[in-house]
Image (cartoon, coloured by chain):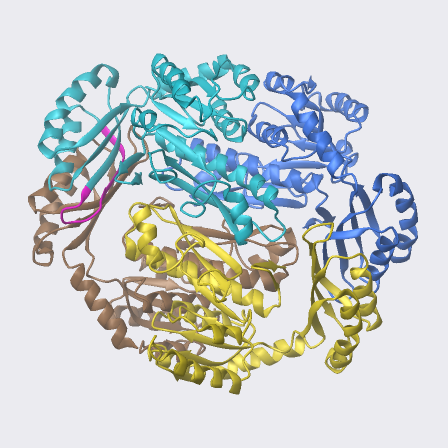
Chain colours: A blue, B brown, C cyan, D yellow
Amino acid sequence: MNLVINAQKERYKERQKNRGRLLIKCHDQRGIVAAVSKYLFQYEANIIESSQYSTNPEGGSFFIRIEFECPNLEEKAAGMKSNFQAIADEFVMEWRLQLVSELKKTAIFVSKELHCLREILVEWQDGDMMMEIPLVISNHETAREMVESLNIPFYHIPATKDNRLEAEQQQLKLLDEYDIDLIILARYMQILTPAFVAAHPYKIINIHHSFLPAFVGARPYDRAYDRGVKIIGATSHYVTNELDEGPIIEQDIKRVDHRDHVEDLKRTGRSIERSVLARAVKWHVEDRIIVHGNKTVVF
Amino acid sequence: MNLVINAQKERYKERQKNRGRLLIKCHDQRGIVAAVSKYLFQYEANIIESSQYSTNPEGGSFFIRIEFECPNLEEKAAGMKSNFQAIADEFVMEWRLQLVSELKKTAIFVSKELHCLREILVEWQDGDMMMEIPLVISNHETAREMVESLNIPFYHIPATKDNRLEAEQQQLKLLDEYDIDLIILARYMQILTPAFVAAHPYKIINIHHSFLPAFVGARPYDRAYDRGVKIIGATSHYVTNELDEGPIIEQDIKRVDHRDHVEDLKRTGRSIERSVLARAVKWHVEDRIIVHGNKTVVF
Amino acid sequence: MNLVINAQKERYKERQKNRGRLLIKCHDQRGIVAAVSKYLFQYEANIIESSQYSTNPEGGSFFIRIEFECPNLEEKAAGMKSNFQAIADEFVMEWRLQLVSELKKTAIFVSKELHCLREILVEWQDGDMMMEIPLVISNHETAREMVESLNIPFYHIPATKDNRLEAEQQQLKLLDEYDIDLIILARYMQILTPAFVAAHPYKIINIHHSFLPAFVGARPYDRAYDRGVKIIGATSHYVTNELDEGPIIEQDIKRVDHRDHVEDLKRTGRSIERSVLARAVKWHVEDRIIVHGNKTVVF
Amino acid sequence: MNLVINAQKERYKERQKNRGRLLIKCHDQRGIVAAVSKYLFQYEANIIESSQYSTNPEGGSFFIRIEFECPNLEEKAAGMKSNFQAIADEFVMEWRLQLVSELKKTAIFVSKELHCLREILVEWQDGDMMMEIPLVISNHETAREMVESLNIPFYHIPATKDNRLEAEQQQLKLLDEYDIDLIILARYMQILTPAFVAAHPYKIINIHHSFLPAFVGARPYDRAYDRGVKIIGATSHYVTNELDEGPIIEQDIKRVDHRDHVEDLKRTGRSIERSVLARAVKWHVEDRIIVHGNKTVVF
């Protein structure tokens, strides 16, 4: 199986080898787009798609995402990055320049419920979610067979509230060894410590099984059932140290009705959770998201 | 204009003159459907559409809505109602038998924001919401011209938290005079007293401008903006004496994104509010809703 | 893996052992519901959920689906079926009585695109699609590894337009051996002969990759791209001998925009196709569908 | 009523007086964004929102929409326009520079079905659709009262296939007198002649009552009913001389089911038609649409 996936990835990387993405956040000022587009022009880069947004014409924040084609990008990239710093300094920018061919290295954390993991692996096998998956970490054995059947290393690290620090030590060591860029909590039912979260700012994507801020916390489907809502939802967000309060990336909903018991809400919910998480992950790996305060700009 | 609307209504009532609806709620027991269908058969009624639901096979609640055609229904109706009581007593039912041709008499309460009122009047003029609208009551003059242009009586009753009881006295007197069955709070920004609500149990439909239970209370769009949600919603519910806690009839949502300021959320929200309220009202006037505890069964 | 799935299925069958479903289609006549509910009452069956619909109060068609709990259903079932025939004869009914614990035996046909197969297997492994999958048949080897990793027998039967009859002979033999109730064409890219279709009336579910009747036939995404549509869709339908003309079970859509090339439409389309097919299959295995002419009633 | 609407519009125009929009279409070439952003910088314009798209990195088409704030825009506008021509010539651009405070002057054409007209007037009265409506033209008297109650001039021009040319002469004269920028066919049931269409290229927006290209032509709801579709739709498009074949601006759908007769499809359809048309008109008046061949880029 992995041979097929690898061949697919290699074709993609070859096809995208001259494709880059530039993401910028700074205070809004006149002249930013002029300076950036002049810079790209000097490298013979051709802008394919660009989205820009300012929160406020006077004194607000400025965000831009530019996707471009540039001949011989792989050779030029280092020089382009170091030369951009002068512009970044002038406008006091936060920025990054990503090569599309450098796929994100993603670790997936999972517990016993596997629907989110399965969805990601389905999209990934179909070539519809371009990233590397060097490992899967779980506090249970449930996912081992599925993961290993795709030749992805699977690590079982039992984690409870009693051994949290120790378990996180092992996890952090693995994330470091595999040089991980992105962590997906695919219904991983453990709370992470502030130190763990701080080590991966806006690099941890969680799926919460409610339409936040409704039903923050535990047992959202039971509470949705008790309230008699007509719609249930799921929310994907970056993890911060405020439980269920991180910047929201994506939300979606489905209709339910009086015939749906809690078990039905959970079943419908699984279908929402996996599609919402998959979209959030796709947008992250396509460098479409800029975090701004406790919100996201999704281009 | 009203001549057209009246002609439309008369045609509808003529067409539906043999159409009835029977709604029943009781403890689940064997034999209910058998008894009810035998009863309808005796009156030569033909069941057109029927929906039934039990919360639980053992000891739960039973709900049914039956729509039927019955020759000479208008003449038979009184007899049918009195004869049904024996069945109702046997199974300890709450029930009602409605003639479709007896349109609900609806009062609309409105303040200064008119989008929900406009939507209802649009649907009503198109013949897509079959009910009588004998009057509109407002604590402002804003809606007068629009309402009176349709030959609907408009009553301006200033209402603030200081004169609430007095205002409600006037309102109740009007509702009584016009023999009102249903009250629609089409963005009516005043809180009703417990006495007012108690006088019209499950006969007052409100629209709340958020996806309840998210953003209960005031200023939901401001709070949605602050939280950075990707979807906003609206909720239509029966009014009870718990603020925003009554049985939910219908909810819906629309997508928003980082470009949307509070004003944009409000604009998008207006569009959701009016369609959600319109659907809830339609289901009520079509006798599709049975309240059960703090939830609704919508058939 | 299969041990987990099997345990799940056994628990489900045990839980549902007294649950039955009665589906009826006939000419509309007075007294049907009375007769059927009296019959169920005699067997001490309790109606849990019932949906009924008549196309027309005068001389139309009548459809009903009743889900009931009945003590000792498995022992009573044969007697119930033979005793129902008298009622069926009186009203000239087409009918079936299904035990929920008797899971449908489903064969999945697939070619090289695996997303629909993967979706079904995901839902099935999660226990969200209750059926047996005794075998998968493909004209390619692509799916073998995935299928066999779940201990499902996989049969590679090369099929082209040149050996169609011969391939179908092998397929029919397998369907017979495994006593198959339902065939899912999960993006199986071969046309079936009239004889094959006739052998399984309304037992073959296909997914078409467009919003029928738009883009009947080949290459729908290319044609959608050329037309500049803003929404693409997928349609699941029963297979008949008119290409893409069988009774529609379910359709759904997603938004696309000017940035989407044909490849993007295909990627988005895959996501619609798999969810639409999964819903159609679920409704079929839950006995929710009654075919009526070239349409479906979905209760 | 109009006093309120006028006050609302004047406040909007005052608030937006420095806001402009620049729309460009040309062959993709390096340096376009650099040249345009340098030009805007010279005028001290600050880019608020910008969206750019190229069909193809090599030799494709380039589209950009820039919304900007520029001090004293109203005084500068004429100079900005004439100075932009040099850039436009260099890159062989089609372009326009719009002042947001210059509201589009819109004529609405309507026949006897008024739901689309009502929706537009609702949004317009709420200040959610910023444009002038100098007149409404109809081949029937049905809309007169509603239109005149808002102090909008109403012209009854009987139009049939027999007097088409003559009627269009009168219509064109009025469009000219009122200096109309945009024509909305709000369920105007007459076909326009090629000469009329040619006089307003991509300035006529129609609503078709199906999900094009399904059910091109007459009686789409009847045909949707016959086919047994599970979803119906509506399509808003620019009018060209190919019936129902002009560039699609927006489409949307709603679910229907087996209980819906043709009349129900029409009722549901009215609700889709009016919201789809309203969105298309809003995008047009916000200068979000660039026509490209037979497609639209909607930014």
Q: Report the residue at 88% width, 39% height from top.
A: A75
List x then y, in percent, for residue B59. Answer: 28, 30
On screen, residue B231 above or below B33: below
Specify whether residue A117 is painted magenta.
Answer: no
Query: Which residue occupies the foreground of this view, B241 or A81?
Result: A81
Residue D257's place in the image compared with D95, above or below, is above
Magenta stretch: includes residue C54: yes
Residue at the outermost bottom position: D177
Vertical order, D228 against C94 (above or below): below
Give the magenta range.
Answer: C46-61
In the rendered view, does A128 fall on the left or right side of B75? right
The residue closer to the viewer here, C206 or A146, is C206
Note whether residue D72 is visible. Answer: no
Prevailing secondary structure of the magenta residues: strand
The C terminus of chain D appears in which quarter of the rendering?
bottom right
User: Where is residue B192 shown, x and y percent of the image?
Assistant: 41, 63
Q: Position of residue C294 (x, y in %)?
A: 29, 40
Is D43 on the left or on the right of B30, as rendered?
right
Quarter holding residue D264: bottom left
Which residue reaches farthest front?
Answer: C162
For image coordinates 40% across by 31% down, the residue present is C281
Q: Quadrant of residue A264?
A: top left
User: Residue C153 in the image: x percent, y percent?
Assistant: 47, 13
* Foreground of the two, A255 or A225: A255
Q: How many marks?
A: 0
Residue C18 or B187: which is nearer the viewer?
Answer: C18
Asked if residue C159 shows in the view, the reply is yes
